[in-house]
Amino acid sequence: MTNFVEKSIRRETMRYDTIVDVPYLEKSPPCMPANDPASPQELVDNAAAIEALADAGKPHVTHLPISYREIAAFAMCIDFLLISGAAVVSSSVYQFFGVTMAGELSRDFATAVFVAAIFVSATWARKLYNPEMLTRWHEQFQNLAGAWCGTFFLLASGVFAWGVGKELSRGTVLLFWGIGGCMLLVHRAFWRFFLPRALSKGSLRGRNAVVITWDSPLTQAISTDLSRHGYIVTHRFVLNSNAEKSSATLLQAVNALHGKPIDDIFLIPPLGQDVDIGGVARQLRVFPVPVTLLPDEATAALIRNPWYELGSSLAVEVQGPPLSPAERALKRGFDIIFSALVLLALSPLFVLVALAVKLETRGPAFFIQTRHGFNGQPFRIFKFRTMSVLEDGAVVTQARKDDHRVTRVGAWLRKSSIDEMPQFLNVLIGDMSVVGPRPHASAHDDYFLKCVENYAFRSHVKSGITGWAQVRGARGITDTIDKIQTRVDLDLWYIKHWSFALDLSIIIRTIGVIIIGKNAV
């Protein structure tokens, strides 16, 4: 037996791969002590004793035909099927009442495939199919509302652009939207209530696991956590920090495990010690099973980050952008369409306002000032002129209530926020977004950067015409550090919790704020 294993190890020269997972920190039975290498028979006896101890007194658990790793793919497939089924049901209902022709079922199903592909891709990109995320009801509901409505917004835009609106029944599409949204919501409710219970009972499909550790403190957390996720720890071995002793012990462990029914091997490295994990993994390649590293918290945080190959080097992203490429594309697409529609609809009003401004006082109808947006890049912001002065430089005085510089037309424009409407031109150009942190004059930016904590982080996204701070009461003048700090805190919350649904909510709430006119100056 020993010769077979040693020959297998010598033949193994391929580079090893590891799959990384991070355990929850929970208590588990103490691991098997290991000082000097034990004999193969002792290891087998100890492993058998551990198996007997693990099985003793445990209630019978019915394992489900799915493992923890398969949950994400399983949930994604269910979403795809539910969306397709919702389209078929919607089309069938309309056909049953004779509203649409039978030949439209194929077109409705093709539409469902398009919608399912967009929605599932967006949800997968945000990692919301991960088991841990499936139990977070608030984030799931928020993403469902944003992604589902955003998908149908893209569908409507595509139908308009391709000129195929007559071939799709609006009633069927609306029914599809309603039925599909409800089915997806029920699907998420299922995971929210089912998954925690399945994990606590250990009822996910069982897999025989081997734990190999260097007597790490994390070892105490492994057994219970693996059991919750459907694993059955059948063997546990503790290596020595000494390289020679560790190699000998590992060789004996390999001999003891040869021919045993194992599905996974987990490695738990010690904290703050340099051990040859690669060498251990190479010896374990004699087994045709996954070898998984369970790192400490600091290493796990780094491993979670995206990585890519940079020539012959491996580059790991330590800090990522607040929005993924798909999210940026969705936000930019909405900005272009929404700003174009607003400018088209309000163009007659713009002409009347420009004439009113010109007739009251001498000077241009528009006020153009330098502001700083994404990544602190300067741009020229457009507004209707509301004052008798045009300040843009090192010193800019904020407007106050009863400011003598504000004209009569300007006071009305400020009260109704119509003076901000030309900024949709900035959105269309790409300098701003419909929703985001409000930009300040360059002179104020320089001051706030020195006095306000984390002020620079507001520039991680594009500036907006309206924002979370504006609909949460932080609108108007910022004449104290406390006021600007409150605005910054709200802006940073928005950046951290961004979603398409949140943007839509802010736009709707902004209308109410404008009608009330609170804090407008």
Image (spheres, grey):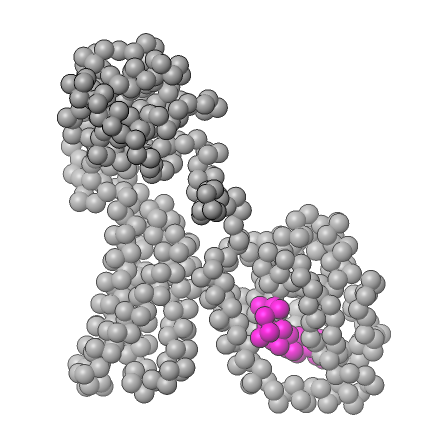
In the rendered image, is residue 250 in sight?
yes
Residue 471's spot in the image, x, y percent? 59, 64
Which residue: 30% across, 82% down? 168
Give the residues in magenta: 411-433
Q: Is 418 colored magenta in this rendering? A: yes
Image location (x, y in percent) of residue 19: 33, 38
- Residue 363: quadrant of the picture: bottom right
Q: Residue at x 29, y 16 (%)?
A: 249
Residue 360 shown left or right of residue 298 in the figure: right
Residue sitting nearer the eye, 293 or 72: 293
Q: Viewed as shown, does residue 387 lie left or right of 217? A: right
> Is residue 267 or residue 148 the one in the foreground?
267
Name the residue at 35% across, 48% down.
130
Q: Quadrant of the C terminus?
A: bottom right
Q: Is residue 57 above or below residue 39?
A: below
Quadrant for the N terminus in the image: top left
